[in-house]
Image (spheres, rainbow, N blue to C red):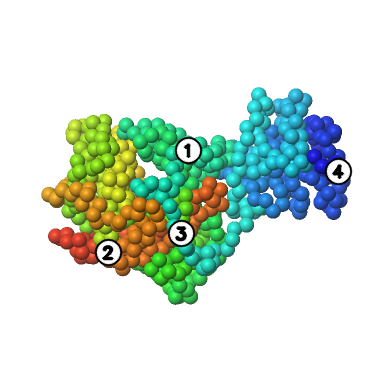
Amino acid sequence: MNDVTPVVGLLGDGLLRDAVEVWLDKKVRLRDAADLPQDEHDGLVALVLLSDSWTDAPLNSHPGIQVPVLPVTAELGHVVVGPLTSPGTAGCWTCADMRRRRNHPGRYAVVDRNRDALARSPAPWLTPFSTDAVAALVADEITALASGAAPRSAAAFLRVSLEDLAVRTHLVLPEPLCSVCGELPEDTAARGLLTLYPRPKPRPEAFRIRNATDEHQALLRLFVDSEAGLIREVSTGDEGGLPVARAPLPIRGHTAEESGWGRSDSYRAGAATAVLEAVERWGGLQAGGKRTAVRATYREVRETAVDPRTLGLYTPERYQIPDFPFTPFHEDLPMHWVWAHSFARNEPVLLPESYAYYGAHVLRPDEPRLAYEISNGCALGSCLEEAILYGLLEVAERDAFLIAWYARRQVARIDLASARDPRVRMLAAHLEEETSRTITVLDTTVEQGLPCVWAIAVDRTNDGDRARAVCAGGSHLVPERAVLNALCELGPILASVDRSYAQHRRRVTAMAADSSLVQTMGDHSLVYADPSVFCRLEFLFSSPERRSLEAMAARSIPISADDLTKDVRHAIDRYLRTGLDVLVVDQTTLEQRAGGLACVKVVVPGTAPMTFGHEMRRVDGLSRLFDVPRLLGDPAPPSTVAGLNPFPHPFP
């Protein structure tokens, strides 16, 4: 500690104030901040705010303080120390409060209803012994701060149980939209322009720069916390004989949750994947890395904007349906736009915000939404280039799946015996043995040649209590990896659909008879559990052609042995050479940057957009639904919207 005795201000009264005063009296010079003029605050090392009762937003009653503030407040059964809130430093008490409220909406609903009573009543479990323990923690925090060391409450808070005095530290990631410390940079054309850099591969066959499984513990520490984490918890289990993990993600402005799912060949990998998928969802839902700044009509920005009609909208008649939640597009409709990088034009272009961020409407309820949009094309990576690759592969997988479905394509069956990786054959055999189903994997690859597959499991027991058929998709630059991805998805989905089918048989029967009742993501798989609609899937088995994985690899891009960015550029070039643009929105948030991650939304205008809810499907204005089957030599390609498959797709 410096030779000059540090000065610390105390504000508040009660048992906590008395105990802290005793502990700090011999370490620092104390001042009663209630009597301290505003111009003397600058001489304080810190200001400690103390309350024996629940205090709503303790910093709000003391605005303009320009020294570090350490809140110490009693709650129901706990005392919370921190977070230390310092001027100009992100990660404050309000950030923590926002995250805690999202993780525990029920608790805070009770608190809000009883705010006045809680504020008047000191915590009944505060005793001289417990307040002494809390005061010792506060003294350690102030001593560390005064000596230039890092207090534990910097970007974190300590939660002391008044039942057993257990102390738990909860990390607080800065909240980008915090009203106190959040400062998002403006989304500009310059920030929309992207530059790809060489990214050395750790191994020739690696397409991830970092191994998520190896970073499992670090990911959990950074993102998962029951009290204030971006993710509240990660649960693991088995589905269809394979490990599966779920990471629930609370959403800004809503009590609903998104979930990240991890389906892999180990619990560790599954948990890491679930966390990363949830973190990806966080970036894709709402703008948390840049502040949207452009609001205009398409007519005003058409020289630099993507025409929304190329993204797949609805017919005018659909927009006239009562309670239809979307707004018909016209060129004089004002809307928010974000900047994306166009690889065809090599310059930034404007994209509707509601398309770039599929949860933007939650924070902007009056913003017109043109169509149903999901996380399609959103991806997370350890660098921008890696994220772009996996976002593009997701677009490719779903575009290929939907073209196969809408056009009822006769696609080749993949010869799994041709796989060099023994895991392909072993996993398929394991699923067949474990689930008593026949597994078939089909090649749905379209004109770009990026390997895409469709896996389907068909029940062979004729047991009426089991799902008749379940589907999954997969894609990768390496065909065998695409197959593995699809099979790893298929096993857990099978178990889930079997369980739901047994519980909701009557509703499944109704959906089979009336496609408009297929309204959620789960419904799209569930309806094909009904044996009466298996005939809708029979076209998938109509081709006599069998294709080796080696033949699929020959159509894919040349794989670089040492630079991931070369693979990314080759994949993008496949789209550019077939007349399609590739757009990328950098969605990376502050939380993702804290983990050394990048998040993007990849958009390829003209490709088939994945939707859930049969009434939400988007096929209007998408010529490739007709052109691609004809280009690939299908014997009877559709030529009109009326000729497209009229039934709900089975993508899970």
Between residue 75 and residue 591, name the one nearer to us: 591
Residue placed under numbered mark 3 in the picture:
197
Query: Helix or strand or loop: what does disc 3 sit on?
Result: loop
How many C-alpha atoms fall within 10 Å of the one at disc 3: few (<14), some, or many (≥20)? Answer: few
Q: Amino acid at mark 1?
A: His
Where residue 540 sits in the image (x, y, percent)? Answer: 19, 49
Q: Nearer the viewer, mark 3 or mark 4?
A: 3
Residue placed under numbered mark 2 in the picture:
624
If you read the primary sequence from the N terminus, does the residue marked by circle 1 or circle 3 appear first? Answer: 3
Residue placed under numbered mark 1 in the picture:
216
Quadrant containing the C terminus is top left
Please indicate whether residue 377 sits to the left or right of residue 591 in the image.
left
Q: CA distance from mark 2 to mark 4?
A: 75 Å
Q: Amino acid at mark 4?
A: Val
Instruction: Tell me what residue is drawn at x 23 percent, y 45 percent.
Output: 441
Residue placed under numbered mark 4 in the picture:
4
Instruction: Tell me what residue is drawn at x 69 percent, y 33 percent.
Output: 79
